[in-house]
Amino acid sequence: MIQYIAEGVEFPSLQKQKINRWIKDVAADYDKKIGEIAYIFCSDERILEVNKQYLDHDYYTDIITFDYSESNIISGDIFISLDTVRSNAVEFGVSFEKELLRILIHGILHLCGQDDKTIELRAEMTRKENLAIEKYID
C-alpha cells in the first residue's frame, strides 16, 4: 500500500509502521482510505528534472505530488527532495525528522484534496500539517 523508495540518495531513517498508521489516520480524518502510495526520496537535481519534465516548472522544490486518487481512495507518487527538506529544516529551525514528517503529510493532504495555491490556503495547509504532526507525536 505505502512504498518508500530512495532514488540516488541515502534512505532516511523512518519508523515505517508508525508512519503508515499515522498516514491512514490522517487520511481517515478526510474520509479517505489509502490506495497505492509511493514516496520517492531523491536529490534536488532529480526533483528539478521531475518538475521540468512533468510540470514545466524550472525550479527546485521540496515535494511534488502526482495524484492518482479515485473517489475516496487516495493514491499517488510523492517525490521528496531530501536536500531541500534538510535546508528547510535549518531555515525553519526544526529537526530534519520533524521537517520530513511535515513533508510526508503535506503530500497526503494534497491527495486528500487540500490545496496551497494561495497565501490563505498555504496558511490553512500549514495549520493542518501541524494538527497532523501533533497526532503523530502523541
Image: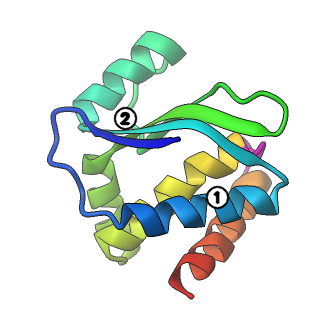
Residue 101 vs residue 16, the one in the foreground: 16
Question: Which residue is painted at 64% across and 58% down in the image?
Answer: 24
Residue 50 vs residue 30, the one in the foreground: 30
Question: Which residue is painted at 60% across and 81% down in the image?
Answer: 134
Q: Quadrant of residue 12?
A: bottom left
Question: Which residue is painted at 68% across and 75% down in the image?
Answer: 131
Which residue is denoted by mark 1 in the rendering? 24
Q: Amino acid at mark 2?
A: Tyr
State how many labels appear.
Answer: 2
Q: Earlier in the sequence, mark 2 or mark 1?
A: 1
Q: Amino acid at mark 1?
A: Lys
Asked if the stretch drawn in magenta spans residue 136, the answer is: no
User: What's the magenta region?
Assistant: 112-118
Q: Quadrant of residue 92?
A: bottom left
Q: Secondary structure at mark 2?
A: loop
Q: Main secondary structure of the magenta part?
A: loop
For residue 137, above or below residue 62: below
For residue 57, above or below residue 23: above
Tell me, for residue 50, which label it has, or none: none
Residue 16 vs residue 13, the one in the foreground: 16
Q: Residues within 10 Å of mark 2 (few under 14, many from 20)?
A: some
Q: Say if residue 70 shows up in the picture.
A: yes
Question: Which residue is painted at 36% across and 60% down in the image?
Answer: 88
Q: Residue 13: image x %, image y %?
A: 24, 63
Which residue is denoted by mark 2 in the rendering? 60
